[in-house]
Amino acid sequence: MGGEVGIALDATTGALLIEETASLPRALHETLHRLVGPAQAIACAAPVEVRMLAPASPRELATVPCVRLAGYWHDSLIEGPGRRSTAKLQGCPIRCRGCVTPESWDAAGGHLVPVGRLADALLDPARERDGVTVLGGEPFAQPERLLALVRALRDRGCPHLVCYSGYTYERLRRVALQRPTIGAVLDEIDVLIDGPYVAALADRAGPWTGSGNQRVIAAIRSAEKTLALLGDQDVPIVWDGRLGQNVPRD
């Protein structure tokens, strides 16, 4: 008997979502192609449509907070609970071996864009979402800009914020003793997904993580909201008090 294949219909977009299409019998693959058209891969590294904002003008660079952006997209189902709009920030000093988006490493790549304009794009009322996810690159490589974006999103009513980092939560808290902006970001967001990508642990990845060492750390203050977004998904979550009181030390 063959293995199971997960198939779901996205009621919002009408897309048919199929896990591991390479494992489908050839006849079924050809039937689906004939009925619904060619498949499009969706993953953290390859969303269906990546959008970009125009670079900040010289006046904007001089007068408003900007963040270095690689791109953004809507309707993500794999980068946090529920349906997400996602911003991918540019620049990463960690450079994990096996990273699927090495083009995001260059700290001079992408464009500087005003955080207000990006927040407006991420919260576009024409698109449905349960929250916004910020990933990279390494978002905490530009902490002042990241905090400005987080606050711009909150000011506009963003209900739930997830942030990824290749650094562990414990390291971020230690660095925050010298750079309080990092601590301010951790205190503002609802969920941190932490840790570097480890290719040898990729087979133990969870629904929103790339490798088994990465953790989903949620603030206790957002527990009810986060659990509501989880629905029936079985996701191991570390709850923190401050953030951090209940998080295992590395």
Image (cartoon, rainbow, N blue to C red):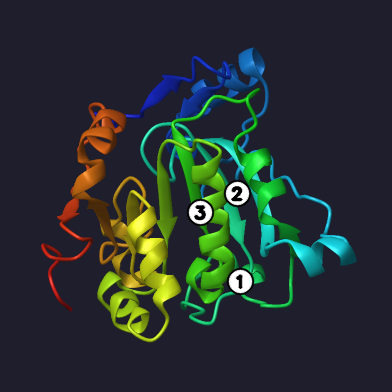
Q: Is residue 15 left or right of residue 66?
A: left
Which label is found at residue 150?
3
* Residue 136 visible in the displayed image: no
For disc 3, the neighbor class at 10 Å (few under 14, some 14 to 19, many from 20) is many
Does residue 81 sit above or below 111 in this rendering? above
Q: Position of residue 92 (x, y in %)?
A: 56, 76
- Determine which residue is flagged by label 1: 102
Mark 2 belongs to which amino acid? Ala
Q: Position of residue 120 (x, y in %)?
A: 66, 40
Q: Is residue 227 left or right of residue 7?
A: left
For disc 2, the neighbor class at 10 Å (few under 14, some 14 to 19, many from 20) is few
At horizontal 51% and vertical 62% (from top left) the residue drawn is: 147
What is the distance, in whole Å, between disc 2 and disc 1 at their CAs? 13 Å
What is the distance, in whole Å, between disc 2 and disc 3 at their CAs? 24 Å
Secondary structure type for disc 1: helix
Q: Which part of the image, by quadrant, shows the N terminus?
A: top left
Residue in the foreground of this view, choosing between 239 and 100: 239
Mark 1 belongs to which amino acid? Pro
Mark 3 belongs to which amino acid? Val
Which label is found at residue 138?
none
Residue 85 position by quadrant: top right
Does residue 56 sit above or below 1 in this rendering? below
Secondary structure type for disc 2: loop
For disc 1, the neighbor class at 10 Å (few under 14, some 14 to 19, many from 20) is some
Residue in the foreground of this view, choosing between 113 and 203: 113
Q: Position of residue 240 (x, y in %)?
A: 17, 57
Does residue 74 sit above or below 136 in this rendering? above
- Determine which residue is flagged by label 2: 46
At horizontal 36% and vertical 49% (from top left) the residue drawn is: 208
At horizontal 63% and vertical 25% (from top left) the residue drawn is: 125
Query: Which of the two marks, 2 or 3, is nearer to us in this view?
Result: 3
